[in-house]
């Protein structure tokens, strides 16, 4: 819930917190903790460590909606409450939610309803977490607060053998680099192609964005390919020119609502709100194939669909 609304703050302190404590749980709201952590990271960490998440959607605050989406994504049980008159979003409406009023009788009814709901949900949520181990989804913080950020992203690419997928709004931090970094990226892509792997790059369909992708692919990547020894060069070019299973695909699309990096058995999701000012707050969530395969495979299938529906840009590697 937003922290600066006096009425909602009263609902939290006198109703929500008491209902949670009545069932023997610790109630946590991030503004009650004094910490040096970035507030987004603190909220993410607490959602990750929680059994149940309770969200008040009364003001339809974008941050709250984002946090609800994150909680659903990692398999947490979410109880939604909202003041009477709130237009609950359609994709939340099908889930558990409680509408409340603000008179003394109505707030008491909210407390009773919350207590009953929590008593039903908590045992199920605890058992679900034990069985699914969905907690294996790892949060690395936000896009720009990943420790050793440059090394972190580069290592994903260098470790890839079978596939490397790059899905982003512009991918600027990957393909619009210094000469040295662009050559390193080119060599890493060549390595994947030589291992019979596949590299796929997806960006927004804007002229400026397409221009620096094409600049990288022709001025750096293709130039590096041409400098390979003859046998290596021939093999890579054959893969690049293979219409059925090309070693490298560049496509554009305008329907992706998240960024992603796929490296063999690792999948990094960067969910973002659909506003430019929120992109720097994109979380970095890591899924590993084999540990949380259903989630890994679901996201991988969605990314494959994005590439299938996207417009492929033909690069002439002649």
Image (tube, rainbow, N blue to C red):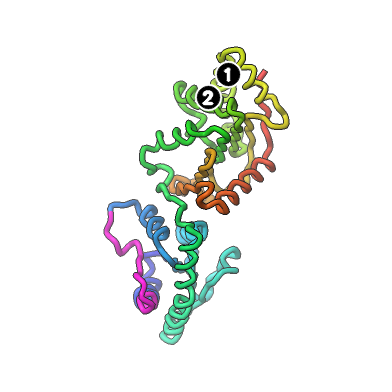
Estimate the x, y position of residue 160 in percent, counting from the top left. Answer: 52, 34
Q: Magenta stretch: give its range.
A: 18-35
**In the figure, 258 relative to 63: above or below?**
above
For residue 64, side relative to residue 235 (left or right): left
For residue 245, side relative to residue 21 (left or right): right
Whether residue 288 appears in magenta in the rendering, the answer is: no
Q: Which residue is mark 1?
A: 225
Marks 2 and 1, Cα distance to the nearest angstrom? 8 Å
Q: Quadrant of the N terminus?
A: bottom left
For residue 145, side relative to residue 128 (left or right): left
- Residue 227 occupies which quadrant of the picture? top right
Q: Which residue is mark 2?
A: 186
Which residue shows up at 64% across the image and 20% down it? 235
Q: Quadrant of the C terminus?
A: top right
Q: Secondary structure at mark 1?
A: helix
Which residue shows up at 61% across the image and 15% down it? 231
Mark 2 burial class by Cα count in 10 Å: few <14, some 14-19, many 20+: many
């Amino acid at each position: 819930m937003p922290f600066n609304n006096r009425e909602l703050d009263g609902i939290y302190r006198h109703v929500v917190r008491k209902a949670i404590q009545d069932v023997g749980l610790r109630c946590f709201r991030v503004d009650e903790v004094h910490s040096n952590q970035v507030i987004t990271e603190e909220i993410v960490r607490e959602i990750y460590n929680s059994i149940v998440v309770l969200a008040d959607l009364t003001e339809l605050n974008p941050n709250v909606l984002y946090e609800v989406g994150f909680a659903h994504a990692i398999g947490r049980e979410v109880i939604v409450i909202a003041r009477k008159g709130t237009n609950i979003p359609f994709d939340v409406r099908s889930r558990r939610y409680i509408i409340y009023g603000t008179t003394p009788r109505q707030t008491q009814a909210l407390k009773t309803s919350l207590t009953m709901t929590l008593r039903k949900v908590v045992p199920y949520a605890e058992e679900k977490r034990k069985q699914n181990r969905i907690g294996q989804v790892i949060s690395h913080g936000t896009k720009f607060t990943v420790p050793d950020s440059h090394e972190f992203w580069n290592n994903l690419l260098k470790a890839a053998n079978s596939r490397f997928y790059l899905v982003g709004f512009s991918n600027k931090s990957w393909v619009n680099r210094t000469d040295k970094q662009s050559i390193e990226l080119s060599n890493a892509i060549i390595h994947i192609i030589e291992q019979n792997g596949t590299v796929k790059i997806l960006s927004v369909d804007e002229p400026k964005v397409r221009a620096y992708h094409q600049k990288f692919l022709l001025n750096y990547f293709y130039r590096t390919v041409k400098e390979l020894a003859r046998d290596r060069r021939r093999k890579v070019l054959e893969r690049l020119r293979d219409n059925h299973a090309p070693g490298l695909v560049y496509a554009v699309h305008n329907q992706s609502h998240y960024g992603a990096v796929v490296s063999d058995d690792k999948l990094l999701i960067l969910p973002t709100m659909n506003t430019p000012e929120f992109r720097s707050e994109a979380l970095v969530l890591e899924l590993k194939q084999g540990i949380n395969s259903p989630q890994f495979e679901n996201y991988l299938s969605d990314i494959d669909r994005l590439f299938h529906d996207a417009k492929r840009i033909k690069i002439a590697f002649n």
